Image (cartoon, rainbow, N blue to C red):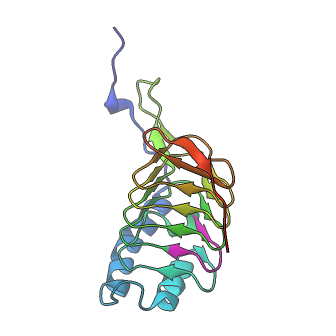
Amino acid sequence: MPTIDLSKYKNTLSRKHQIIRLIWSIVWPMCTWFLPRSMGSGWKRFVLNLFGARISKGVVIQSSIKVYYPKNLIVGKNSWLGDYVNFYNVDLITIGENVVVSQYSHLCTASHSVSESSFRLVTKPIAIDNCAWVAAEAFVGMGVRIGEGAVVGARAVVVKDVEPWSIVGGNPAITIKKREIKN
């Protein structure tokens, strides 16, 4: 019977990457703890951009977000990043314009190879297109693209691409209906 041998696991992330993460894990809380909720989004954009993120003007950022590696985060203008969103961005996360990522959502770009005894790290980017909404406590897995205008329902688990202008929900997420904007 095959077995898993975690002693063979090798961290493939560079020492520079690890040092930047260490510094980042100290700097972000120190620079934002005193700012309630979305106050000071301009300052938070500045701090994220200083560490290599590409955060556009008008992005609203809650102080409680968690960003694993700022350099792997791109956010388009006028998007909202809600309370306690976890960006586990070992790989790139790209968020378009006018996107909402609601509270306690988890965007995860990394996992491990379940077919290798060394449990090798595997990563794939996540993309969220313009005008999409990832609702509260949703999980978006690695390699997923959420299409333009799509809605990921609260607590949904998304492991496959979401078609533009569709609404998905559940675990695993399935299409519920098309999204229509009525003015």
Corner quadrant of residue 111: top left
Q: Magenta stretch: residue 74 in it?
A: yes
Say above or below: 35 vs 80: below
Residue 46, position in %: x, y?
Answer: 53, 86
The residue drawn where x is 41% and y is 73% is 24
The answer, for residue 98, to whether it is visible in the render is yes
Residue 74, position in %: x, y?
Answer: 61, 69
Residue 21, position in %: x, y?
Answer: 42, 66
Q: Is residue 53 left or right of residue 148?
A: left
Q: In this view, does 183 lie to the left or right of 157?
A: right
The residue drawn where x is 63% and y is 85% is 57
Q: Magenta stretch: residue 56 in it?
A: no
Say above or below: 165 vs 61: above
Corner quadrant of residue 19: bottom left
Point out the image quarter for the C terminus.
bottom right
Q: Is residue 29 left or right of residue 109?
A: left
Point out the image quarter for the N terminus.
top left
**Which residue of the protein is positioned furthest toward the front in this rendering?**
183
Compare residues 1 and 95 and report the one nearer the observer.
Answer: 95
Say above or below: 154 vs 163: below
Residue 182, position in %: x, y?
Answer: 66, 69
The residue drawn where x is 34% and y is 89% is 35
The answer, for residue 144, to whether it is visible in the render is no
Compare residues 128 and 28 and report the one nearer the observer.
Answer: 128
Magenta part of the chain: 73-80
Say above or below: 110 vs 27: above
